[in-house]
Amino acid sequence: MNTQFAFTGLNPFDDPLDRIFAEIALSIQLPPSLHDKAKGREKAVRTHLEGTAAFQDQIEHFYPQGSMAIDATISTRGTDDEYDLDLVSQLGGRFRSMKPLDILKELEKAFADYPVQRIRRQTRCVTLYYADKMHLDVTPALRNSGTAERESFITHAKGPQPSADDSFVDMNAYGFAEWYRERTPLEARMAEEFHRRWRNLERSGFRAEAEVDDVPDQADFVVKNVATLALQLIKRFRNIVYAGYSGRIPPSVMLSFYAGRAAQPNTALSVMVIRISKWIIADIENATLYGKRLHVTNPVCEDDVFTDRWPESVDQQNEFARHLRALVDGLEKMRQGEMFPDDMMEWLRGNFGDRVVTRATENIAAEVGDAIQNSQQLYTRRGGLIIPKPAIITGSVTAATVTAPTVAAAKPHTFFGKKI
């Protein structure tokens, strides 16, 4: 493994525009307490499987994959407080001679008495549904001998009866997570600030809707760099624009690939969202130019195709490119101060969801209010005073107001008397 360089990173809360996006990200990502609970459930699920006759001494590795492996989990599509988490159970022994559907049925049977609300066998995994709206996908895998570490075949079988379409699909989720972490090193200043804000928000009760447990003081903060934060925002944007769509949507693992590929430490948050989006748009345009569907593979396993089930057509990928262009256009207008405050709030709510944008602005209002009560000012690294425009907090300013949030020269009590 290559040695990573240490990066300071930019604090998005220093920038009035990036601040609202950072607050949105805080509102959608897996809370630290649920992150700890997920770890506990991962262990409990493995212990349960190993305690059954079918899986005793048959589990070679048990590990997270997807967003859970790279600390990029956000709320599930169409929701604000449900989370999908993914685990891989690498199996050995007798499972190597079984068919895909038989393995999935065996896994489903092993969870028959597991204490969750519901159990569902999917095409490639078995999903456990918990009462607190967490969903845990357990994907069975068989080691592909002679290949990179943990490269495996996962099951693909729709059921309920065996089909000619049943197969084993090559994948290396473990290797991809390692690749992603290498591409997205820790940005210390950003991570520390987010850790601080997580603890403050949880203690003040702002996230009571999404969790039950208190967060231990020493809980590790999980989002460590701006690329992952931008990835979470793009995933949220995708979830909102496809909220009423019944078909397949752009896969999270594909978006994660582009975040890793476009990663550039010490970049502003809104700039990173634009950068990742433009990278995706460029590849879609290039594929469309030749009448081909977008083809994205795991950088450490070319037979692991991230786009094997999406896009289903050139038109489908072009639709996503149009959505991304609208996202980029809106962000660039905001960065250039070309969007009126009321329009900005409407755009944010339309693209990231009314509830989380409202929660984010309430968090900003609360922090500004606390700073005023404590006779504190919020300063940038260069000594400028961060003044959230009223529209950023409430959306109530008229079009005649200044069109973008600003960083003003530091003056005593600049926003005293402002209505938050």
Image: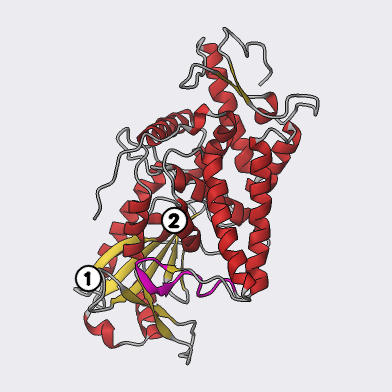
Residue found at x 63% / y 46%: 352
272 lies left or right of 125: right
Amino acid type of the residue that numbered disc 1 sits on in the rendered structure: Glu
**Foreground pick, 119 / 151:** 151
Q: State the image coordinates of residue 374 (x, y, percent, origin top left).
A: 50, 11
Which quarter of the figure has residue 408? Answer: top right
Quick check: marks 1 and 2 in contact, CB under 8 Å? no
Q: What's the colour scheme?
A: secondary structure
**Foreground pick, 272 / 237:** 272
Residue found at x 35% / y 71%: 301
Q: Which residues are magenta?
A: 298-311
Quadrant that contains the C terminus: top right
Q: Between marks 1 and 2, how big is the CA–CA gap?
A: 31 Å
Residue found at x 62% / y 39%: 357
Which quarter of the figure has residue 8? Answer: top left
Residue at image mark 2: 261
**Foreground pick, 206 / 398:** 398
Q: Is residue 33 magenta?
A: no
User: Farthest left residue?
Assistant: 57
Say few, some or many: other residues with alpha carbon within 10 Å of mark 1 (under 14 / 14 to 19 / 20 or more): some
Residue at image mark 1: 60
**Earlier residue among tags 1 and 2:** 1
Vertical order, 44 against 59 (above or below): above
Q: Is residue 306 magenta?
A: yes
Quadrant that contains the N terminus: bottom left
Q: State the image coordinates of residue 150 (x, y, percent, origin top left).
A: 27, 69
